[in-house]
Amino acid sequence: MSTAPDVTVFRTVLATQLGWMFDDNDVPQLAQVLRDRVETARLHPGAYLRRLARGDWDAELGALAEDLTINETYFFRHGEQFRALAEVVLPERLRDRYAQRMLRLLSVGCSSGEEAYTLAIVAREAQSDPGWILDVLGLDASAAMLEQAARARYSGWALRETPDAVRARWFHPEDGEYILDPAIRASVRFRRYNVATEDEQLWHSGQYDVIFCRNLLMYLTPDVRESLIGRMTRSLAPGGCLFLGHTDTLGSQPEGLEPQQSHQAFYYRRAPSAATLAAQAPRLRPPARQEPTPASQEAARAVPRKAPATPAAPAAPGDVYGRALGLLRDERFEEALAAVEDALGARPAPRDLLLHGVLLAQAGRLEEAEIVCRRLLDVDGLYADAHHQLAVCLEGGAAVDVAIGHYRLAAYLDPGFAMPRLRLGLLARRRGELRTARTELERALALLKQEREERLTLFGGGFGRIALTSLCRAELDSQVPR
């Protein structure tokens, strides 16, 4: 029978051996997992924890990875990132790699393979010349998930965001499932990997053109997170790109990575001129091979069954807006949209309608989102947030000139509103209006320091204050004249 001290030690061992972070809310789950694993191993809890702490019980670490993670994923998840990949990033990488005629992409925390295979499909369709070599590597801590990925058989639910043409081209229905085409399967390989460990060959400098590491960093201990960021940065080729999840953050702008924005997606690009980066990965100490003792910092991993490490204050009972905003922050978009739509009455509050419009736009339902925003403005034509969200919808629908007008009106109505200034700066830069771009980006940079967290969640596209600030600085440093 495991005790509270046993669970505390268990948290410490997970932090040390796997780099995962758990908080007090996770104690009941951890206690149950510990009981189950102790029973399976037929060991006393103390003996089990001592053996686990040695770091050489690979099979048991793999079993824990399976017990302590959920794997909610699907093909083409967050399509705006894959559109940016297909239309901006890959054309640049194909030009840069023309002499080698090889692309290498990495999926960190690949789960059951949907993300890695999506990368392969997008990269394959971006190549007009069949003579290229495509190498996609998927990493995950769970052997069971990797076995499932290797089978490459998926339910229709896993393909719910897959375009019909892509589904017809690369998937073959069989017995109620979809089998991935052999041409795609041949370009993807999988490997079990513990992010708390070093592997110089895996992270060889400059080898990857694209890295996807989504919804992982915020669940890691600070030292493992810092080391992984350094490894990924170092292993990107100059000009290569790093895509994170909407709830992930780098914490600060790592040396050698430049924030980028396209197709309503943010990502990071390794400086093309950086043949050697100063951002070397901090070396992790090898996991301790001694009896564990309670530690003040616990840990987490790719998608543990827990809330983010720094969640917002819990919403009050009945506070649908607060609950849905939290779901948006946690990247649970469908749940957030369902919560808002279930609660909308005949006379919804303006903030509920605004959040509804944001979530509709996030789901790609721009016309519906535009209708919601115009409904808000019919009631209050001076609502700056509604003008901003309407502009987002119009920009996404290619009505850029009209969008600019609403961004300007939002900034005029609320001089402290940073987000319309940022959008105006980025649009001006795109149109070659460099002086206007500098003016707006400088204003956005100043205003971001005080921007409300609520607005960052609503309008930041999943990126927080630090990432948006870094984006402004990168744009200002990128040949925008004074």
Image (cartoon, rainbow, N blue to C red):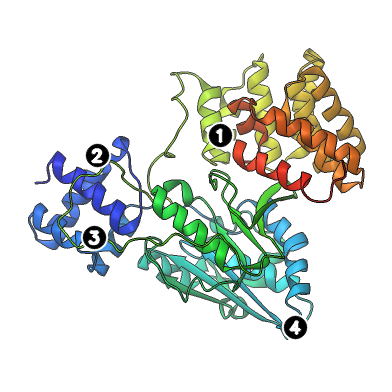
**Residue 440 on image: x %, y %:** 82, 34
Q: Which dot, 1 or 2, sits closer to the camera?
A: 2
> Is the residue marked by circle 1 packed among few (<14), some (14-19), or many (20+) residues within 10 Å?
many
Residue 28 is labelled as 2
**373 left or right of 3 in image:** right
Between the residue at mark 2 and the residue at mark 4, the CA separation in whole angstroms equals 55 Å
The residue pinned by badge 3 equals 288
Q: Which dot, 1 or 4, sits closer to the camera?
A: 4
- Residue 413, by quadrant, is top right
Q: Is residue 323 above or below residue 296?
A: above
Label 1–label 2 contact, CB within 8 A = no
The residue pinned by badge 4 equals 99
**Circle 4: residue type:** Ala
- The residue lying toward the viewer, choosing from 66 and 250, is 250
| Label whose residue precedes the other's in the sequence (1 or 2) | 2
- The residue lying toward the viewer, choosing from 189 and 334, is 189
Between the residue at mark 2 and the residue at mark 3, the CA separation in whole angstroms equals 26 Å
Q: Is residue 325 above or below residue 289?
A: above
Q: Quadrant of the C terminus?
A: top right
**Circle 2: residue type:** Pro
Label 3, secondary structure: give it. loop
